[in-house]
Image (cartoon, rainbow, N blue to C red):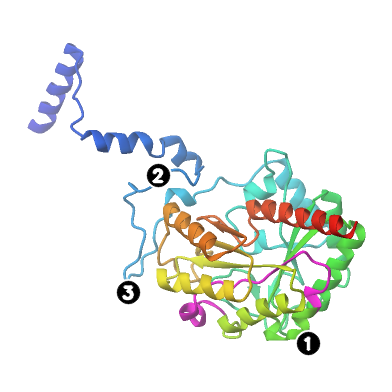
């Protein structure tokens, strides 16, 4: 009680005299606080790569053997998706029996992409061949089964119809793994691309494809389907691949898929992605980036792994925005045409799509000039 009385006395004296206690923080510390993220940034979850999070005191890395999950740092917080564009897109997808990786993989960017940007353009990454995968990677929340339902023969046309209706000029198609089908579903993916180009010859198509168990004929089928960007994700560094991915998904096999796509069609843009925060070292990340460049990969994305459910792998470390900026610079130095690196960057990253769209359009203009 004596302590409380003393506090009340000091407070009363300050109020009467009109004075207040001055800060004892050094000037450098004050400047850091002033220049750092504001309260509003924390509340809204809005972050830019220029923000300085170096003073964040939360725990970013789990120690070996530690079971408790890490708390989500402020730069990974997102607003709850809502709005009429979000609802409209979801209604269109359900009406045509289409699935998206945005929903199935619990992507944190779904509100931003489906809700539309400043031009009121909504985007979604369509997931072909159903919503059930034959593989069970420990980072992925997509449903899994040894024998999923048969392919929907109407899916290629329905997908093309929906995308044409939305008026998109760049679309990303991905798919589940279908090891239960002889060609891994490559013909189905190729048919969707062909149907898209038939309905809208100007549309640019990126396909994020499985490894087809390393089958070169399946890779060739997709690579020559008329798509503009061939994407396949390496996902993680070589040492962690057996623990993170399904046993049928192998690091060297993924590199071979990307290499063969480029061999079949040398001018095809290829793309891959690495998740960070699973326990990899800087040396391993750098080696993976070098391996991808050796495989002829043109574009690379690096983003934060986020545990989708309690059944999946825990996050080992949350990587800071400053470190992602470092990897972006490394990507440039290694010769990637484009490197998108950030905590919330995903395989189908909108800024990356914007860059690739401009790159492809410039290429087409050059080809037309040469042929004129």
Q: Is residue 186 visible?
A: yes
Q: Position of residue 280 (x, y in %)?
A: 43, 71
Q: Position of residue 200 (x, y in %)?
A: 89, 56
Answer yes or no: do the residues labelled 1 and 3 have beta carbons within 8 Å?
A: no
- In the picture of the structure, the residue carrying the numbered disc 3 is 65
**Distance between mark 2 and mark 1 Cα atoms:** 50 Å
Residue furthest out toward the top: 17
Residue in the image at 81% along x and 78% along y: 221
Q: Name the foreground residue: 11 vs 283.
A: 283
Could you classify mark 3 by the number of other residues whose Cα lies within 10 Å: few (under 14), some (14-19), or many (20 or more)?
few
Discs 2/3, front: 2
Of helix, strand and loop, which one carries label 1? loop
> Disc 2 to disc 3, how far (Cα)?
31 Å
Q: Which mark is residue 328?
A: none
What residue sits 14% from the left and 17% below the top? 13
Q: What is the x, y in percent for residue 118?
A: 68, 38
Please say if the residues under marks 2 and 1 sit with CB atoms less than 8 Å apart: no
Q: CA distance from mark 1 to mark 3?
A: 42 Å
Expressed as whole percent of the image width and height from the top left, the position of residue 23 reads 21, 29
User: Where is mark 1, residue-wise?
Assistant: 182
303 relative to 56, above or below:
below
């Amino acid at each position: 009680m004596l302590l409380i009385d003393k506090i009340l006395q000091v407070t009363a004296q300050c109020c009467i005299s009109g004075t207040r206690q001055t800060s004892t923080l050094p000037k450098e510390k004050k400047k850091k606080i002033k220049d750092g993220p504001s309260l509003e940034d924390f509340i809204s979850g809005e972050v830019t790569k220029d923000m300085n999070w170096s003073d964040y005191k939360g725990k970013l890395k789990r120690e070996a053997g530690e079971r408790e999950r890490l708390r989500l740092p402020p730069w990974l917080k997102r607003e709850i998706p809502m709005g009429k564009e979000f609802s409209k897109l979801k209604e269109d997808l359900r009406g045509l029996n289409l699935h998206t990786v945005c929903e199935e993989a619990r992507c944190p960017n779904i509100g931003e992409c489906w809700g539309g940007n400043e031009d009121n353009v909504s985007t979604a990454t369509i997931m072909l061949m159903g919503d059930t995968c034959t593989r069970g990677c420990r980072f992925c929340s997509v449903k899994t089964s040894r024998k999923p339902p048969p392919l929907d023969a109407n899916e290629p046309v329905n997908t093309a119809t929906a995308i044409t209706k939305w008026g998109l000029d760049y679309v990303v198609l991905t798919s589940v793994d279908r090891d239960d089908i002889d060609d891994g579903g490559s013909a189905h993916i190729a048919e969707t691309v062909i149907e898209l180009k038939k309905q809208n010859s100007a549309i640019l198509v990126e396909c994020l494809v499985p490894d087809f168990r390393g089958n070169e004929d399946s890779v060739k089928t997709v690579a020559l389907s008329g798509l503009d960007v061939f994407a396949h994700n390496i996902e993680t560094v070589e040492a962690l691949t057996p623990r993170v991915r399904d046993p049928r998904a192998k690091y060297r096999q993924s590199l071979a898929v990307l290499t063969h796509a480029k061999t079949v069609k040398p001018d095809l843009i290829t793309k891959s992605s690495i998740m960070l925060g699973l326990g990899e070292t800087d040396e391993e990340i750098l080696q993976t980036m070098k391996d991808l460049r050796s495989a002829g990969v043109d574009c690379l994305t690096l983003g934060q792994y986020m545990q989708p459910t309690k059944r999946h792998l825990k996050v080992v470390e949350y990587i800071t925005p400053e470190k992602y900026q470092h990897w972006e610079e490394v990507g440039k130095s290694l010769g990637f045409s484009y490197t998108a690196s950030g905590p919330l960057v995903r395989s189908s990253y909108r800024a990356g799509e914007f860059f690739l769209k401009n790159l492809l359009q410039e290429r087409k203009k050059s080809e037309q000039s040469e042929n004129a």
